[in-house]
Amino acid sequence: GHATACAAAVAVQKFLRAPGFLDHVKATGSVLAARLNDRFAQHPHVGDIRGRGMLMTVELVEDRDTKAPFAASHGLSSKIYQSAQARGLITHALSGTVDGHDGDHVVICPPLIASGENIDTIVGLLGEAIDAAVLEGREKAA
């Protein structure tokens, strides 16, 4: 197994050095940030969109104006993760990001080979997952 792992690592390094690859990653990272901002900048439950390149985070809040987090009892990050996964989107959703207890955010890190079309699909699915998770939490609270 060790020689195989080394061969794979060398192949990845060669791929990363391929002409134009890093330019593609930089351009696609800019597209990702722009699409996330287009989709979530005015979302009532998105407090912040941050990250760099192809590693971005969307912070979820109960109140956009005050940036008050959802209570941990909502289980929002878990709901987002499950909702995204049901749509075929892999995310990393975290809770307790404000004080170790309350606060939720979701991290996305598309493959470096993703296209602009892939980014559009990813952001669309993430939007659906977030909206469904927030709605589910509201319905249970009512």
Image (spheres, rainbow, N blue to C red):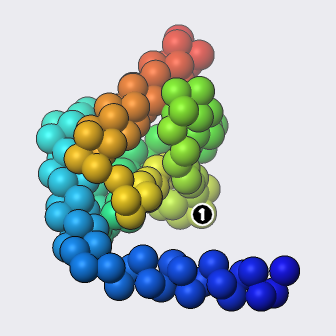
Q: Locate residue 53, reporting x and y percent.
A: 28, 68
From this view, report whether residue 40 is shown above or below residue 12: above
Question: Could you tell me if residue 6 is visible in this image?
Answer: yes
Q: Locate residue 38, reporting x and y percent.
A: 15, 41
**Horizontal side, residue 39 vs residue 100: left or right:** left
Which quadrant is home to the N terminus? bottom right
Which residue position is annotated with label 1? 100
Q: Locate residue 54, reporting x and y percent.
A: 34, 63
Which quarter of the picture shows residue 76? top right
Count of picture labels: 1
Question: Could you tell me if residue 61 is visible in this image?
Answer: no
Q: Locate residue 140, reporting x and y percent.
A: 59, 16
Q: Residue at x 44, y 84 (%)?
A: 14
**Horizontal side, residue 16 vs residue 3: left or right:** left
- The answer to which of 44 and 38 lies nearer the viewer is 38
Q: Residue at x 46, y 22 (%)?
A: 132
- The answer to which of 65 and 86 lies nearer the viewer is 86
Q: Residue at x 63, y 78 (%)?
A: 8
Q: Which residue is drawn at 42% across and 55% down?
A: 110
Residue type, mark 1 in image: Gly
**Horizontal side, residue 51 vs residue 20: left or right:** right
Q: Residues within 10 Å of mark 1 (few under 14, many from 20)?
A: few
Which quarter of the picture shows residue 122? top left
Q: Is mark 1 on a helix, strand or loop?
A: loop
